[in-house]
Image (tube, rainbow, N blue to C red):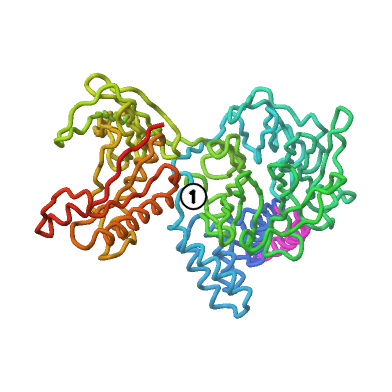
Amino acid sequence: MKRSFIFIIFIGLLGVSCTSLFKKGQKQFSSGEYQYAISTFSKVLEKDPDNKEANFYVAESYRLSNRIEKSSAYYEKLVEEDGTFENYYRLGQSYRNQGRSDEALEAFKQAKGLTLEDGNLNELDREISNLQKIDQIEDYWPYIELENFTLLNTPGPDYAPIVNEGFFYFTSSRQATGIYSATGVPYTKLFRTRADGIKVDVQNIQALPEFKNEEGLNQGSIAISPDGNTIIYARGNSTSSKDLPDVHLFASYFRGGGFTQPIWMPLNEDEFWWNSTPAFSPDGSELYFASNRPGGYGGIDLYKATKLANGDFGNPVNLGPQINTSGNEMFPRMMSDGKFFFASDGHPGFGKLDLFVAEPSEDGLVIKNLGPKINSVADDFGIYFTRYPQDGFITSNREGGQGDDDIYYFEDKTPKPKVVNVFLNVTTKEKKDDGTEEILPQTRVALYDSANKMTGGDFTNQNGRVRFTLAPDQNFSMIASKSGYFSKSITYDTRGKTPRQEDLIQEVTNITLDTTIVLDALILEKSIVLDNIYYDLDKADIRPDAAEELDKLVTILKDNPTISIELSSHTDARATDAYNDALSQRRAESAVAYIVSKGIDAERLVAKGYGKRQLIITNATTEEEHQVNRRTEFKVIEIK
């Protein structure tokens, strides 16, 4: 009896205690003091683990303070008691942000069966589609290496670095006084130190000297104009009733030897809108920032404002649905080549915020996840390049860091390609009257690249040899010339003549190749037969097969710009003299006209039809013998 009475008193005291804690926790939750609310309702759950309201407030406090990955145990309790769309949806988000893709997918499918609203269904379809695309994400930079900047980071948040005029600026909770009640971590301030690329002086970090950090609120991510004369940063989360209720952008300008006190920027537009993560365009004419203002596509969207005549930024424009989603987009970074980097939890990714790039294309923008070498299941954001795109910084709160948001540096470690030297031995020869070839020494050989730029040249030695060093997988041309000979050009292609990079073993591989250039003697008035120049019966039109042979003569004329030629046409002995003379003249003129059409000066050409007056075989009887007589020739008649 006495024991029962004591138990009833205990239960009564427990009820009074829980009621008091509930009122306290609800007040903290309503005031945005989420970390305090978590602490208060956790005490309720110690005594009553299944308390639905306490689980709800802890879960929502984690979600609203951007720590939804810590809420899954509480949403699991809620779906056990009350399997609503909202509870399953939030549970799925919590699983997703822990990298538990299969469980997240199942929770989203459960939520889909508990709603008929188009907005909810569209959001679930997006979440499910994103999860199904994770395995398709590839590394944007395959050889990038990411390292925690352990000497710079602290157990508190350190994030969003930029570099300007040799200084490294960043946000950190070091040296802070006061706790931000929403997250339970100290307020953040702005700092700087010297830097050379990704090499940062961690020994001489100082609070931002341009203007004083304010106490009792968060100074967030910073942007500095390319000319160094404007500083824009995010400021907010004050607990003072006299201050602005949310995060806004403030600007400080270099005037009269120093920076002005920061002032509220008109592009914030409304005191109840969240505006943060500013970044300038490469030329400083535009300001990119994130905002949750009405009219966007989801939680937080990215906007672009234009620099006005008075130096302010105005006329903010939403960057549109290709970049913005129903999730959150922030931390923009526009590059001079048109690529736009940003952080998002709405595009297909690994968990919370991932880093993406929007690449311009003919069809608009192509959005690509930067891949697992950069992103994790945690928040990854705030990319900044010190040497684009080889190295720079990002921020992440992934496992293995110093405790909160940490600054990481990255470097492109693409292995240097193995060297392939292509040595080309060129031999020059001359063709004799009997068709044999002999070495032609002291011949000038000039080498040209694919852009027709001369890259080398020398005379062959007594053995008719000269060596060039060529690049692999490229095409070249060479012109061989010697007094008394027709100059001759040839093309030479090294593509397919060297091993592939992946097949190379040694750091340096030498490949030796050979080619020969044969020159013909240049003798005035010596006739040279053009083979395979055929015409249709009784016609003078240039057939395609004849055009191929005439193109070779065009090349000779281009290689030898100082010569003029007579191009002659001959017939066989059949038909009358007058008929053959007229036909051969028309054919010679037709050939000359074709050559002129290819860019050869007409003054260098003489057309002459000889009919049957210069037969090679005077008593031809067979068709083959008649064909020998039906020929086209050229001879050099002048050398200037």
Q: Nearer the viewer, residue 483 or 251?
A: 483
| Residue 73 x %, y % | 55, 60
Task: Determine if residue 25 is in view.
Answer: no
Identify residue for label 1: 371
Q: Does 473 appear in magenta?
A: no
Check the picture and name the quadrant holding the N terminus.
bottom right
Residue found 56% across the figure and 59% down from its top: 362
Q: Does 16 appear in magenta?
A: yes
What residue type is disc 1 on?
A: Gly
Q: Nearer the viewer, residue 370 or 82?
A: 370
Task: Give the prevailing secondary structure in the magenta stretch.
Answer: helix
| Residue 255 x %, y % | 87, 33
The range drawn in magenta is 6-34
Q: Quadrant of residue 208?
A: top right
Q: Nearer the viewer, residue 296 or 174?
A: 296
Residue found 87% across the figure and 35% down from its top: 260
Left or right relative to 240: residue 221: left
Question: In this rendering, is residue 427 above or below 308?
Answer: above
Residue found 56% across the figure and 32% down from its top: 150
Residue found 35% across the figure and 23% down from its top: 458
| Residue 82 x %, y % | 59, 73
Q: Quadrant of residue 558?
A: top left
Residue farthest along the top direction in this orientation:
462
Number of marks in the image?
1
Left or right relative to 135: residue 503: left
| Residue 47 x %, y % | 62, 59
